[in-house]
Structures are given as structure tokens and as C-alpha cells.
Image (spheres, rainbow, N blue to C red):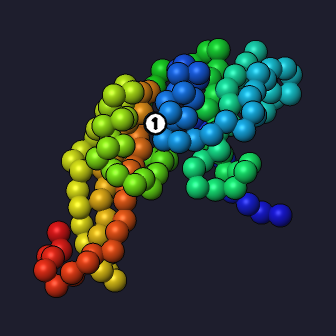
Amino acid sequence: MFRYVHTNIIAKDASKLIDFYKTVLHCKSINETRDLSGEWLDRLTGLNGAHIIGEHLLLPGYGEDHPTLEIFSYDTLKETVPEEINRPGIAHIAFEVDDVETTLSEIIKAGGSSVGELVTTEYPNSLEAVFVYARDPEGNILELQSWRQIKNPASKTSC
């Protein structure tokens, strides 16, 4: 077997970030909470006295148990480097939503922020996309996107 299982976010406050993803981005609890420690975890992480707490949340639009967003917190956290959209490594987590502007407003109300501007652009096959980058309350970058068929493509111009 070979399948994608989860993406992990290390949070400063796991319970607050879990609540944000459940409330604003419609992730669901599947009762997979974690409170992990022990010699095996120290060996796995390369840390002495590692202790992890958190939960797996089902991503919206998928099956009953996977893929998940794994939000954990360690008792001891390293200093962070500011997340930037062009930083090497994982840049963002994307969610397709019904209304990008409304969801961005909900993110900001819940303690997040916007990164750039909301843009609308035309794609091939008479598709139009609305995009915006945002940050969750801990600074992780999110992409919100919405797609729709252009009703009269001849009257639109590409961005």
C-alpha cells in the first residue's frame, strides 16, 4: 500500500489552532487525540524528553478517516523563522472554498491575517479562479481558492 496520510503542523498552542481549523476551515475531529512521550518518541524525534500533544483532524471533502491535518505541540519549542511564501520547504496548505472573500473574513475574525491581495484570474476552458493567501493565527500560510465556469467567456479578458 502507498497513500498520502497527513500533514503535520507544530503549534504554539495546539488546542487554539485545532479549534481554528475546525471552526473556520471545516476540519472535523475523528477522535484521534495524542499525548505521546517515552523512549521510543525520543529515538524517533532525536529529542530528549519529547512530549507531544494534539489531534488529527479530517480534511474537508474526503473520506471518513484520511487524509488528516495533524496539529501537535511539543512541551519545548524552538525559535521560529518567519513563514514567507517564497521560503524553501512547505509553503502553504490550500483549501477550496465556496466564497474566498467570506472565508478570508472569517480567518481574520478568528485571529488570522491576509498575506497578499485577493485576485481573480481566467484559466483555460472558460474557468475563472479566485485566490488569496492568508495566515492562520500562528502564522502558517493558507491558500484559499474558488473555481467557477465563466458564463460568457467572450466578454471577459484574462488577467
Can residue 151 be spotted in the picture?
A: yes
Quadrant including the C terminus:
bottom left
Q: Residue furthest right?
A: 39
Determine the residue positioned at 28% across, 47% down: 101
Asked if residue 134 is positioned above or below residue 110 in the image, the reply reads below
Can residue 88 be spotted in the picture?
A: no
Mark 1: which amino acid?
A: Val
Asked if residue 7 is positioned above or below residue 97 in the image, the reply reads above
- Percent from the top left, x then y, of residue 6? 66, 47
Give the SS element for disc 1.
loop
Determine the residue positioned at 64% across, 28% down: 72
Q: Which residue is mark 1?
A: 24
- Percent from the top left, x then y, of residue 132? 30, 50
Determine the residue positioned at 37% across, 59% down: 146
- Percent from the top left, x then y, of residue 25? 48, 41
Determine the residue positioned at 73% across, 51% down: 64
| 54 to the left or right of 36 | left
Foreground pick, 140 / 77: 140
Quadrant including the N terminus:
bottom right
Foreground pick, 132 / 25: 25
